[in-house]
Image (cartoon, rainbow, N blue to C red):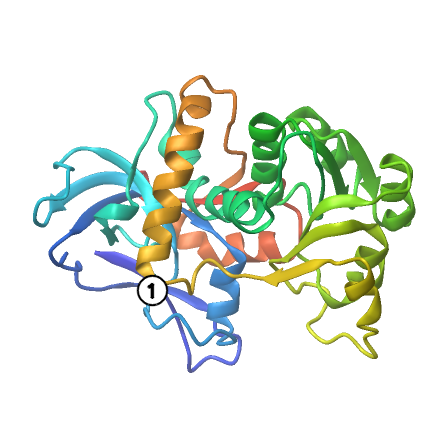
């Protein structure tokens, strides 16, 4: 089969497609004929060698396709259309997926749409509800609202909790798209001070929950933006990982919960439990197409390098997909 690997002898760590062996599923695993895979920031971090938790030579953590082989009593059979997280190996014609992470694809969804679901929707669900404990009618500030996780989080927060959704993005086009998904308050972070706008939108109280992709650059303004007793979930460090001269007293006086999380390095049992909880809660909305994955652009598998450049340029609204089966 063909798979995309990283040329580690190249200073650019360029991507190259090569012939590799089809993986074999162990008991409780599925061999998936991949129709579509999705690009994630974690793929780029792994490509750059900055993450120590991915050892698979082929990139990719989420796929959609058909079951080619089920090993053991998995509840799936050959030909089933499934989507889910894999432990690497997604940028390939075949990949192995633990069966307890596989989700049947709703009938009306294409493989490209299905591939746009697992990583971002599970991340959004985990951060909003398992960690952020978002409750009915609360307010949530979602940074990078037009990103894959952002577009998922807007819909989940609005549909499952009727939350007041406040988003930041860097262009009118992205903000307008967020509004179509259900965002209530739109903030252009390039033109507005988002902490001031959040306080205006919440009558000076601040947001109950913050989903933060940025990290260090937003530390002080997030602190200004959060409500007393609020929950602040850190899921990215696009703006740096080091905060200089942190005053801890505001965290204490506002009784804020700050939690850092990543999904990819979580253990298999955690991912399986999260998948089950998410799928039970959200499947009815998928089936009625009341919650939808957002696909920005599709690239053929051999153009994975271009797909990464598209993400690095922050040009996408929603997910970037790699077409595999239709190559």
Disc 1 residue crowd, few under 14, some 14–19, many 20+, Cα 10 Å: many
Quadrant containing the C terminus in the rendered view:
top left
Residue 99 relative to residue 261: left or right: left
Residue 186 relative to residue 148: left or right: right
Label 1: which residue? 58
Which residue occupies 57% across, 44% down? Answer: 148
Where is residue 260? Give x, y as percent: 59, 63
Pick the front one: 44 or 15: 44
Residue 179 relative to residue 61: left or right: right
Quadrant containing the N terminus in the rendered view:
bottom left
Where is residue 242? Give x, y as percent: 72, 76
Asked where in the image residue 219 lies, by quadrant, the reply is: bottom right
Number of marks in the rendered image: 1
Residue placed furthest toward the left: 72
Pick the front one: 253 or 39: 253
Which residue occupies 46% across, 40% down? Answer: 116
With respect to residue 203, does 29 lie above or below? Answer: below
Where is residue 195? Give x, y as percent: 87, 50
Where is residue 70? Give x, y as percent: 12, 45
With respect to residue 177, does 220 lie above or below? Answer: below
Which residue occupies 47% across, 69% down? Answer: 47
Residue 125 relative to residue 255: left or right: left
Which residue occupies 26% across, 50% down? Answer: 93
With respect to residue 168, does 303 lie above or below? Answer: below
Q: Secondary structure at mark 1?
A: loop
Pick the front one: 315 or 283: 283
Residue 325 in view here: no
Asked where in the image residue 267 lies, by quadrant, the reply is: bottom left
Residue 229 in view here: yes
């Amino acid at each position: 089969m063909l798979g995309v690997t990283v040329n580690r002898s190249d200073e650019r760590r360029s991507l190259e497609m090569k012939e590799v062996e089809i993986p074999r599923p162990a008991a409780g695993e599925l061999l998936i004929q991949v129709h579509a895979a999705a690009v994630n920031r974690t793929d780029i971090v792994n490509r750059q060698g900055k993450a120590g938790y991915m050892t698979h030579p082929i990139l990719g953590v989420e796929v959609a396709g058909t079951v080619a082989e089920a090993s053991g009593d998995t509840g799936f059979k050959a030909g089933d259309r499934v989507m889910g997280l894999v432990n690497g190996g997604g940028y390939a014609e075949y990949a192995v997926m633990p069966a307890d992470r596989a989700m049947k694809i709703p009938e009306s969804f294409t493989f490209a749409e299905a591939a746009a679901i697992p990583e971002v929707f599970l991340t959004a669900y985990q951060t909003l509800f398992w960690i952020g404990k978002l409750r009915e009618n609360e307010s949530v500030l979602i940074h990078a609202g037009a990103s894959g996780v952002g577009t998922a989080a807007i819909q989940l927060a609005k549909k499952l909790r009727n939350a007041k959704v406040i988003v930041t993005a860097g262009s009118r086009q992205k903000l307008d798209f967020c509004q179509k998904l259900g965002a209530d308050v739109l903030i252009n972070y390039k033109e507005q001070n988002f902490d001031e706008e959040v306080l205006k939108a919440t009558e000076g109280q601040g947001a109950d929950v913050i989903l933060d992709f940025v990290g260090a650059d937003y530390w002080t303004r997030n602190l200004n933006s959060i409500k007393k007793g609020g929950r602040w979930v850190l899921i990215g460090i696009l703006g740096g990982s080091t905060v200089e001269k942190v005053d801890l007293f505001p965290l204490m006086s506002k009784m804020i919960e700050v939690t850092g999380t990543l999904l990819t390095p979580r253990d298999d049992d955690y991912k399986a439990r999260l998948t089950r909880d998410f799928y039970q809660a959200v499947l009815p909305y998928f089936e009625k197409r009341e919650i939808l994955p957002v696909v920005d652009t599709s690239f053929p598998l051999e153009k994975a390098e271009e797909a990464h450049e598209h993400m690095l340029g922050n040009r996408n609204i929603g997910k970037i997909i790699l077409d595999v089966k239709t190559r």
